[in-house]
Amino acid sequence: MGILVGLVIAIGCMLGGFVAMGGHLIVIWQPWEFVIIGGMAAGTFVIANPLKVVMDSGKATMEAFTNKGPKRQDFLSLLGLLHALMRELKTKPRNEVETHFDDPENSEIFKSHPEVTKHPDLVLFICDYCRLILIGNARSHEIEALMEEEIGTHKKSVLKPYGAINTVAEALPALGIVAAVLGIVKAMGALDQSPQILGGLIGAALVGTFFGVFASYGVLAPLAIKVKGVREKQCAPYTIIKQTLIAYMNGALPQVAIEHGRKGIAGADRPTIDEVESATVPGARAEAAA
């Protein structure tokens, strides 16, 4: 919604200001200039990126428009799941706890937190490192380094659409110049025409430069920043898991370890201590339900 509102404001002010200066909107309508610039941008985008990144860029754009990132309830569900798993690790024998990580789809703990299980990569991340904790001889600093490496790799992968879109945004002003040069070449072939016709051709050529610059700095560059913000927010649960499990490995009680994870959530989405307690402590959950 924010993207659409921003585009309406930007385009409305641009066109409104042009009309207020006495300009005529019909002059800006040069469809073949738009075809040249848009076609070159799309072609170079496909050349520069593998098909997977091209498709993921479309998905990332839709996520940016819908602001599809984890919400407060998603973080609360994640903390509740981690607390339940840490309680199992602390109180149950290894053979009973392993069943949760070997088959999370049929685990009652995982099934009770559907906000987490709808993300298979996140479930796999949790299971992998809980298995390492079960082994018992893994050092916390080694596990932390391994987690950071995996999180960095994951973040690099999911941010590829940002880099791809931003690269096209940086190229658009130059592509606009290409369209403008082609328009000037056309105008040079009409030097024997009247100044009115020649002026119209030159004006049409300059629209290419205008469109390239506007599409770059007014549309694609802000969109790329939005994509980056949404994808980085989607990576936040991995950091929360890391902080929580490392605190647990260092000897913190499950309820204290959860606090390490809660502090990694941005202020606007961070649940309160009471909300976390209601979602994690069995007695508090029953009291809240009553």
Image (cartoon, rainbow, N blue to C red):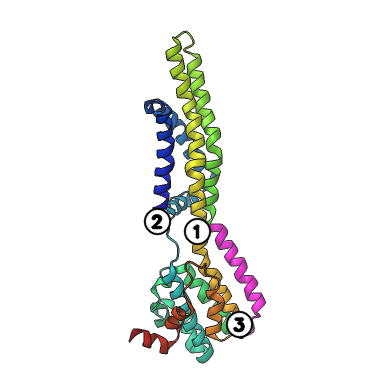
Q: Is residue 102 something one can see in this rendering?
A: no
Give the distance between the C-alpha atoms of the residues marked 2 and 1, in whole angstroms: 12 Å
In which quadrant of the rendered view does residue 138 lie? bottom right
Look at label 1 and name its amino acid.
Arg
Mark 1 = which residue?
231
Residue extent of the magenta highlight: 136-157
255 in relation to 174, above or below:
below
Q: Look at label 2 and name its amino acid.
A: Thr
How many C-alpha atoms fall within 10 Å of the one at disc 1: few (<14), some, or many (≥20)?
Answer: many
Q: Which residue is mark 3?
A: 249
Q: Residue at x 54, y 46 (%)?
A: 166
Dominant secondary-structure state across the stretch colored magenta: helix
Task: State whether residue 217 is above or below residue 20.
Answer: below
Q: Are marks 1 and 3 in contact (CB under 8 Å)?
A: no
Q: Nearer the viewer, mark 2 or mark 1?
A: 2
Local crowd at mark 3 within 10 Å, few (<14), some, or many (≥20)?
Answer: some
Is disc 1 placed on a helix, strand or loop?
helix
Q: Secondary structure at mark 2?
A: helix
Please rate how many residues cluster around mark 2, counting C-alpha atoms within 10 Å: few if below 14, some from 14 to 19, many from 20: few
Above or below 10: residue 19: above
- Label 2, label 3: how many angstroms apart (C-alpha)? 37 Å
In terms of secondary structure, where does tag 3 sit?
helix
Q: Which residue is mark 2?
A: 66
Q: Is residue 171 magenta-colored?
A: no
Name the one closer to the observer, 120 or 28.
28
- Residue type, mark 3 in image: Met
